[in-house]
Image (tube, rainbow, N blue to C red):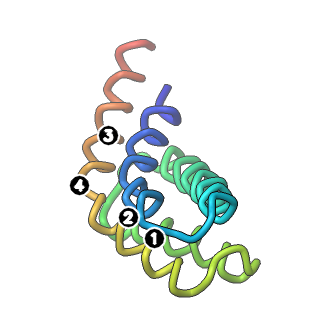
Amino acid sequence: MKLSFLKGVLFGVVAGILLAPKSGRETREEIKKIYAEITDRITEELARLKEVTRDAYNEVVHSVVNAYVQAKQITTMEAEQIIAELKDGYDKIRVAHEEAIRREEKSN
């Protein structure tokens, strides 16, 4: 429950990147796939945290995104764009994380 909720919020934050004009349907599909993977990895890392501080959030985002740069799955420019989009989404993620924890505690 917590993972899917955070994943939805994160994907919403990076959706603006996916809507940016790109050349070719295949390019957009490949980018969409990679961004979904990045979102999944960030979500998994954030779900392990008891509290999502701005520093912890930025560290997770940078770590995951930079791993994709190192693997040459995204360019440095794409990484900078993703990081910028996600940095702006911190408050949404923090609220979503807190809500997910509250829901989890209620269900237990």
The residue at the point 65 percent across, 65 percent down is 27
User: Disc number at residue 20?
Assistant: none
- Alpha-carbon distance for marks 4 and 2? 10 Å
Which residue carries the number 4 mark?
91
Sequence order check: which comes first, mark 1 or mark 4? 1
Residue under label 2: 86
Residue 31 picture quarter: bottom right
- Type of the residue with mark 2: Leu
Residue depicted at 42% across the width and 12% down the height: 107
Indicate which label's residue lies in the foreground, 4 or 2: 2
Instruction: Give the labeled residue for mark 1.
Output: 82
- Determine whether the residue tagged by mark 1 lies in a helix, strand or loop: helix
Density class for disc 2 (Cα within 10 Å; few <14, some 14-19, many ≥20) is many
What distance separates the C-alpha of mark 1 from that of mark 4? 16 Å
- At label 3, the amino acid type is Ala
* C-alpha separation, residue under disc 2 versus residue under disc 3: 14 Å
Q: Which residue is mark 3?
A: 96
Check if mark 2's residue and mark 1's residue have beta carbons within 8 Å.
Answer: yes
Q: Which numbered disc, 1 or 3, marks the residue closer to the eye?
A: 1
Query: Do residues under tags 1 and 4 come within 8 Å of each other at their CB atoms?
Result: no
